[in-house]
Image (tube, helix red, strand yellow):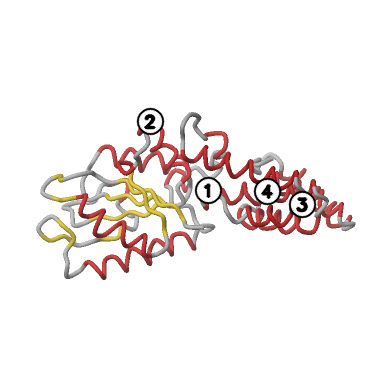
Amino acid sequence: MALHVFVAMPYGRKQDIDFDAVYADYLKPALGGAGFEVFRADEEERAGDIKTDMFQELLLADLVVVDLTLDNPNVWYELGVRHALRARGVLLVQSERAYQPFDIYTDRKLRYHLKDGRPDPDQLEADKAALASMARATMESWHGRPISPVYQLLKDLREPAWRDLLLGGDNEFRAAYESWRQRVEVARKRNLPGDVLTLAEETPTWTLRLEARLAAGRALMKLQQYKLALEQVDAALALDPDNAGGQRDKAILLGRLGQHDAATTWADTLVRTAPAIRMTGA
């Protein structure tokens, strides 16, 4: 499944820079060529509230690429929302600017080159390669130190459960998730564990993969496919080792498989760490 990237940047021509050309010639082809699915808010063709789509993107996009070449209030706002909602998954880019804002002075930013207000043809291929490489590296280091200064400084802050914040109405993420969830339920009711395993790899965005693994594990548990269910739960815990729902399911499955000592150990861990662990998917 392709990783989903949301791009926050100015639109049109601002201060002699053609940002639509920056997106079309630099950002989108660089990220798309690296295997990412790239989206900018003005590309949405459905009727609806652009703010709703924007907030869902900032919550659920696997990666948010932010262009800070200019001090655009909308772009700064979107960066702040992402930093508040998610601990990771932000990449900052910019062209040359006279000064660096204090709040992000030490943050790593990838520079791209302009000529006459558009991406510099002589530097474009190198700039695209650098962006693709940095985007891949950002995703590969997902479980490292938080990127968001909010989560860096507020050590006990936890990301909100995405499902609790999923907005209602005509929304692409809600529609895609509900369609996927229904397909898992149909496969379970038809006693098709192979279909459940396939669907676990087909979540609407990579961000929802934790929910996918937990849902698949529970569907397989109901089908009494305990070994396969445990594989899915272990995959979920590899993504979020502190997930209470996953730890609880693993304890149950170990017991069903006759591994009672291991089940007791997991249950003890769950009770001991309950105040600090996340209940996503519980």
The earlier-in-sequence mark between 2 and 4 is 2
Residue, disc 4: 214
The image shows a total of numbered marks equal to 4
- Which part of the image, by quadrant, shows the C terminus? top right
Mark 3 → mark 2, Cα distance in angstroms: 41 Å
User: What's the amino acid at mark 4?
Assistant: Leu
Q: Secondary structure at mark 2?
A: loop
Relative horizontal placement of residue 72, taking residue 78 as reference (left or right) = left
CB within 8 Å, label 3 to label 4? no
Instruction: Between label 2 and label 4, give the one nearer the viewer.
Output: 2
The earlier-in-sequence mark between 3 and 4 is 4
Mark 3 → mark 1, Cα distance in angstroms: 25 Å
Residue 34: where, in percent of width, then height?
A: 39, 64
Residue, disc 3: 250
Q: Secondary structure at mark 3?
A: helix
Sort mark 4 into few (<14), some (14-19) or many (20+) by Cα contacts within 10 Å. Answer: many
Residue beneath the point at 75% across and 43% down: 189
Mark 2 → mark 4, Cα distance in angstroms: 31 Å
Residue beneath the point at 25% across and 47% down: 101
Residue 186: where, in percent of width, then height?
A: 69, 43
User: What's the amino acid at mark 3?
Assistant: Lys
Residue, disc 1: 204
Hey, which residue is sitting farthest front in the picture? 190
User: What's the amino acid at mark 2?
Assistant: Gly
Residue, disc 2: 48
Q: Nearer the viewer, residue 91 or 186?
A: 186
